[in-house]
Image (cartoon, rainbow, N blue to C red):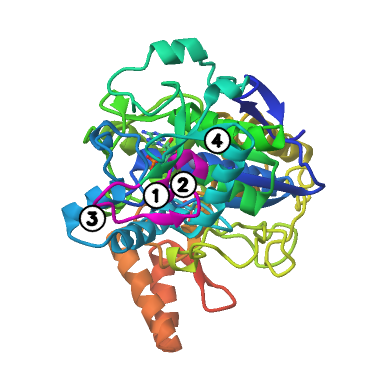
C-alpha cells in the first residue's frame, strides 16, 4: 500500500505516484507575512507536514517548497481599495515593508517549529522572484493568453483557457454573472484576473518592466513562477487550504497549463477550515489565535497538533477552549501510558526507532536555500528506508498487525483519528512492553508528538510526578551538569525511595520512570 490522497482536480482518492523513482516534490502555499499566522493557517501547513512524513515513512525522498508572500495581494475586502497589504501593515506599524516582512517571517518559522512542522527545503520569497514572474507574464501575452489593458495592467484572458473552472467546479458564465461590486473597467471580461498590475502613485513596492512600465505582480503568478523554478514544470503534490481552490489554484493552473499543456501538479490537496465560534478562523474577522498564546497559557503547543490529528483534514474542525483542553488531556494520557513503560533500551532490537526532528526555528533555511535536498540527501542523518512496510523491530504477529493497521489508516487519505485509535489500542494491548513502546515511538515518526520526550528529565511537563519528585529530579539534573556525581547518587537513592527510578544514558541525558507500587 502506498499513500492515497483525495485529489481536488479529479474529485477522487488516488495514490501518490512519484514521477521519478523514489522522490516526490510538493509545493505548499505559504504565509502572507504582513501579520502573524494563526492556528487555522497552521492547520493547513500541518496537512502538508503529514503528507511529507507519511511519504518519508514509506522511504520516499520529499522535496518541499513553501512560498513566503511578502508582496501584497488583493484578496481581502479590506484591501479592495487597491492598497498593498504590506503597505497597509507598514503604515499601521510605521515600519518599512521589508522590516514588517522580516519580523513576521521569523514569527512564522517559530510557530511552525512549535508544532513540529518539518521545515520546507526552500522558502522562496515573492520579492526575490519578480523577474521570473515578469517572464511568465510576457510569455502568456506572447502566446495570446493575456493582454495589456489601457492602464498598463496585464490580465489573463480566462476565455482562452477551455479548462478554466475544472479544479473549482466553477462555470465561467456563472462566474461572470456573479461578479459583484466594482469591476476594473479596463478588463475585457469580468472574470479575467491580473498577472501584473500597473503601479499607481504612492506605491512603494514596485518593479520596472521592459514592456509595461513600473508595476507589481498579481498573487497567483507568484506560485506559478516559484513552483516552476524549484520543482520544474510538473511535480506531484500541491497543497493549500480549501479557500485556495478558487481563485488562487484555479488561476495558477490556468497560468501554468497555458504554457506547458498540463496543470503544474498532479495531485491538488486541500485542507478544510479550522473554525472558531462557528466561523472560519480569520484575522479579518477578528476570531483568531496564535499558537504562542497556548504556551503563554501554560499549554503545550503540541496539544494543537494533537487536536488537528483528531480530525480528518477534509473535515471542518472546531477550535475552542473545550476542544483544546480535550486534546491536551488526550496527549497527556498518551504520554502517561508511554512513560509507564519506561525508556527504551539503548541497544538491541527494541531500541528507539528512527525519529524525525523538526528542529528549532533558527535552524530553518532563510528564503532560498542553496539547492534543494530532501531527507534522502546523503548528508542528512535520516536514512531513507521503507519503515512503513519494513518495520525495524522483530514484531510479534499481533504487534505487526497493529503496526499495519496504523499504516493502513495513514495511507487511507491521512485517516489520523483511526491511526491515533490504533496507537491507543497498541498501548493498551497485552503484547510485551518493549513492543508497545516501540510501536508508539514508530508511529510518532508521522504523528510528530515528540512522544520520546516523556523520559527526558528536562521536561517541563508535570504529569505523572509529584512536585517533590520533580524537585528532586531537577536538583539531580543540576548536580550532574555541575559534575557533582556524589550528590547525584544520593538523589538517585532518594528518588528510588520516592518510587522513581532514574537511568543515566550515554551522552549526559537521563531518563526516569515511576515504579509500580506493590
Ligand atoms: P494566507 O496567509 O491567508 O494566504 O493563508 C495561508 C494558508 O492558510 C492558506 O493555505 C489558507 O488556505 C490557510 N487558511 C487560512 N485560514 C484558515 C483556516 N481558518 N483554517 C485552515 N486553513 C486556513
Ligand atoms: Zn500559492
Residue on which disc 1 sits: 215
At 54% from the left and 43% from the top, the residue drawn is: 137
Q: Which residue is mark 4?
A: 252
Q: Is disc 3 placed on a helix, strand or loop?
A: helix
User: Is disc 4 placed on a helix, strand or loop?
Assistant: helix
Residue 18: x, y in percent? 76, 41
Instruction: State the image coordinates of residue 400 (x, y, percent, origin top left).
Output: 75, 39
Q: Residues within 10 Å of mark 4 (few under 14, many from 20)?
A: many
**Which range of residues does the magenta coloring cover?**
199-221
- Whichever of labels 2 and 3 marks the residue nearer the N terminus, that label is 2
Q: Earlier in the sequence, mark 3 or mark 4?
A: 3
Instruction: Specify whether 383 is left or right of 204.
Output: right
Residue located beneath label 2 in the image: 30
**Mark with earlier residue (2, 1):** 2
Considering only order in the chain, which callout, 4 or 2, is on the residue closer to the N terminus? 2
According to the image, label 3 marks what residue? 90
* Mark 1 beta carbon near ligand 2 (under 8 Å): no
Q: On the image, which quarter does residue 490 sit in? A: bottom left
- The percent coordinates of residue 129 (x first, y second) are 51, 56
Indicate yes or no whether the magenta region holds residue 4: no
Can residue 35 be seen in this snapshot?
no
Amino acid at each position: 500500500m502506498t499513500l492515497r490522497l483525495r485529489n481536488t482536480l479529479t474529485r477522487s482518492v488516488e495514490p501518490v505516484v512519484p514521477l521519478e523513482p523514489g522522490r516526490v516534490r510538493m509545493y505548499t502555499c505559504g504565509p502572507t507575512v504582513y501579520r502573524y499566522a494563526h492556528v487555522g493557517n497552521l492547520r493547513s501547513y500541518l496537512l502538508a507536514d503529514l503528507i511529507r512524513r507519511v511519504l518519508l515513512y514509506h522511504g520516499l525522498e520529499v522535496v518541499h517548497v513553501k512560498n513566503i508572500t511578502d508582496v501584497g495581494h488583493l484578496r481581502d475586502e479590506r484591501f479592495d481599495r487597491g492598497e498593498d497589504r504590506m503597505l497597509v501593515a507598514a503604515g499601521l506599524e510605521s515600519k518599512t515593508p521589508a522590516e514588517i516582512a522580516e519580523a513576521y517571517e521569523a514569527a512564522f518559522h517559530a510557530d511552525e517549529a512549535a508544532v513540529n512542522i518539518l521545515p520546507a527545503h526552500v522558502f522562496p520569497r515573492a520579492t526575490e522572484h519578480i523577474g521570473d514572474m515578469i517572464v511568465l507574464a510576457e510569455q502568456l501575452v506572447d502566446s495570446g493568453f493575456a493582454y495589456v489593458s489601457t492602464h498598463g495592467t496585464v490580465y489573463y484572458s480566462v476565455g482562452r483557457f477551455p479548462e478554466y473552472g475544472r479544479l473549482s467546479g466553477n462555470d465561467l458564465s456563472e462566474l461572470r454573472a456573479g461578479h459583484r461590486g466594482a469591476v476594473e473597467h479596463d478588463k475585457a471580461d469580468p472574470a479575467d484576473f491580473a498577472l501584473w498590475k500597473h503601479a499607481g502613485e504612492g506605491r512603494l513596492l514596485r518593479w520596472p518592466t521592459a514592456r509595461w512600465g513600473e508595476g507589481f505582480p498579481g498573487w497567483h503568478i507568484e506560485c506559478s513562477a516559484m513552483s516552476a523554478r524549484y520543482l520544474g514544470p510538473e511535480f506531484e503534490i500541491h497543497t493549500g487550504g480549501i479557500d485556495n481552490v478558487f481563485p488562487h489554484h484555479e488561476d495558477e493552473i490556468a497560468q501554468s497549463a497555458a504554457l506547458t499543456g498540463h496543470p503544474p501538479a498532479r495531485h491538488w490537496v486541500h485542507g478544510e477550515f479550522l473554525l472558531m465560534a462557528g466561523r472560519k478562523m480569520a484575522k479579518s474577522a477578528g476570531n483568531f489565535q496564535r499558537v504562542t498564546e497556548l504556551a503563554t497559557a501554560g499549554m503545550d503547543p503540541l496539544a494543537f497538533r494533537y487536536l488537528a490529528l483528531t480530525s480528518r483534514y477534509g473535515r471542518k474542525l472546531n477550535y475552542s477552549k473545550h476542544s483544546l483542553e480535550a486534546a491536551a488531556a488526550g496527549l497527556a494520557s498518551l504520554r502517561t501510558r508511554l512513560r509507564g513503560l519506561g525508556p527504551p533500551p539503548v541497544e538491541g532490537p527494541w531500541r528507539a526507532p528512527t525519529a524525525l526532528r523538526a528542529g528549532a526555528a533558527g535552524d530553518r533555511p532563510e528564503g532560498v536555500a542553496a539547492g534543494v535536498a530532501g531527507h534522502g540527501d546523503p548528508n542528512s542523518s535520516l536514512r531513507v528506508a521503507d519503515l512503513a512496510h519494513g518495520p525495524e523491530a522483530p514484531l510479534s504477529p499481533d504487534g505487526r498487525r497493529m503496526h499495519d493497521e496504523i499504516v493502513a489508516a495513514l495511507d487511507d487519505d491521512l485517516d489520523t483519528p483511526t491511526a491515533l485509535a490504533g496507537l491507543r489500542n497498541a498501548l493498551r494491548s497485552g503484547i510485551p512492553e518493549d513492543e508497545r513502546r516501540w510501536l508508539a515511538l514508530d508511529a510518532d515518526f508521522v504523528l510528530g508528538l515528540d512522544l520520546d520526550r516523556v523520559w527526558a528529565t528536562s521536561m517541563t511537563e508535570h504529569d505523572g510526578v509529584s512536585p517533590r519528585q520533580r524537585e528532586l529530579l531537577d536538583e539531580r539534573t543540576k548536580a550532574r551538569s555541575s559534575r557533582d556525581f556524589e550528590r547525584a547518587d544520593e538523589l538517585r537513592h532518594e528518588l528510588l525511595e520516592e518510587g522513581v527510578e532514574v537511568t543515566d544514558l550515554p551522552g549526559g541525558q537521563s531518563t526516569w520512570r515511576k515504579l509500580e507500587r506493590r
